[in-house]
Amino acid sequence: MSLGLMTPIHPKWDDFLDRLEGPDGCNFRDVVRNGKKDSTWDCDNTPNRPIARKHLAALGATSQEIEQSLGFFHAFGGHCDCEIAFNVQDSFESYMGRGRRRRNP
């Protein structure tokens, strides 16, 4: 069975975000710089979105579903891997008129 279009209302959305944000993804983490707490992550800032592609495929998405999902992410502000985590859910929920369900990484 295929995954289908990945959106914030997909039953595997939280799993996808956990993978995207985790150590095998963008690896969001806190660091200390010059004695101050800061955040950092890994992202190549390209529209190719290799991390999202990898995790969509691991969840069972077909090539077509990956491309459709990336198009959806782009439409809702996910222009690179980290922007999927930062923007897509909030933009989608704002578009749908819903409150926020999950905090940014």
Image: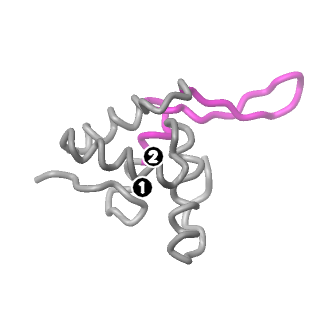
Asked if the magenta segment contains residue 20, the reply would be: yes
- Tell me the residue that label 1 is attached to: 14
Q: Which residue occupies 62% across, 52% down?
A: 104
Element at badge 1? helix
Q: Which residue occupies 21% across, 39% down?
A: 63
Crowd band around label 2 with a 10 angstrom C-alpha radius: few (<14), some (14–19), many (20+)? some
Q: Is residue 10 above or below residue 49?
A: below
Q: Using the numbered discs, state the Cα–Cα distance from disc 2 to disc 1 in whole angstroms.
A: 6 Å
Q: Which residues are magenta?
A: 17-43
Q: Amino acid at mark 1?
A: Asp
User: Do the residues under discs 2 and 1 have CB atoms within 8 angstroms?
Assistant: yes
Q: Amino acid at mark 2?
A: Asp
Crowd band around label 1 with a 10 angstrom C-alpha radius: few (<14), some (14–19), many (20+)? some
- Tell me the residue that label 2 is attached to: 18
Quadrant of the rendered structure where residue 59 is?
top left
Front-lying residue, 36 or 47 = 47
Element at badge 2? helix
